[in-house]
Image (cartoon, rainbow, N blue to C red):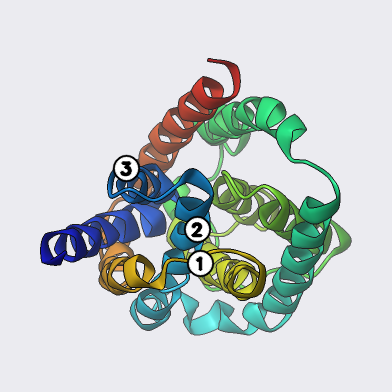
Amino acid sequence: MLIIVLGLFIAGIAAGVVSTLVGMASLISYPVLLAVGLPPVTANVTNTAALTFTGLGVGVSSRYELRTNYRDLYWILPLTVLGSLLGSFLLVIFPSQIFEKIVPFLVLMAAIVFLIRPYLHANRPLADIRENVPIDRNFIMISAVFLISIYGGYFGAASGVFTLLAFTMTAGLKYTVANAVKNISGAVANLVATIIYAFYGNVNWGYALPMGAGFVIGGWIGPKVARSLPAETFRWLIILGAFVLSGYLFYKAYL
């Protein structure tokens, strides 16, 4: 049992770092939970519960990136909570199988947009993209945050990629700042889902807590790594992550 707990802790650290960089923690943590013997549904809800702990590490480690944009969380987080609740409610009513066929294409499109982004902003270097400017609370931005939150509560996969796309393309934020806001809002969305799962799901807390402890450390390390990366390198990490996630989702949906 000690070996399992240690393995979950180490997997949590690795997945936490990946989560805060490119938002694909579940590609590491979910298979590990399956490997230790949890059924797929239990592994899924346990993974979501563990992911919630990432927010603790991210909140401490991302203070630099959020020194101006933390006020944006005052309107982003309520929308995230409402959207996640609505998405979770819709999941109870409507099956998510249709999204399993569509999402791989959406993630692939997001990867392509990140790939061609420099050509969309040819006169503005990546390093000069807005860093310390509040996000405009216009209709498009509010709608994007709310709709992505609904999607995250309903289906979940790749919601971090779509959030990054919204904050970098629509709001024009620097990658590291957009990533910090994404990580905080994602942690809140996972918390909402975890509360629901705690009442209606089958969370294995004996596995969620050691993995969650690893997520705290990984969530603390990730922003420090992101901060040290050049903007172009960070962009390519996101592109690579999005293509890998798209391939994984294609495999699950069609093979």
First in sequence, mark 3 or 1: give its number: 1
| Residue 233: mark | 3
What x and y, as percent, mark residue 196? 66, 71
First in sequence, mark 2 or 1: give its number: 1
**Which residue corresponds to mark 1?**
131
**Which residue corresponds to mark 2?**
174
What x and y, as percent, mark residue 100? 66, 31
Q: Residue at x 63, y 84 (%)?
A: 71
Q: Residue at x 62, y 50 (%)?
A: 156
Q: Amino acid at mark 2?
A: Lys
Q: Nearer the viewer, residue 122 or 107?
A: 107
* Label 2 – label 1 distance at C-alpha: 5 Å
Position of residue 35 relative to residue 103, above or below, is below
Element on which disc 1 rests: loop
Element on which disc 2 rests: loop
Instruction: Mark 2 and mark 1 in contact? Answer it, CB < 8 Å.
Output: yes
Q: Does the image show residue 134?
A: no
Q: Amino acid at mark 1?
A: Glu
Instruction: Mark 2 and mark 3 in contact? Answer it, CB < 8 Å.
Output: no
* Label 3 – label 1 distance at C-alpha: 17 Å
| Residue 81: mark | none
Q: In screen coordinates, is 247 left or right of 20?
A: right
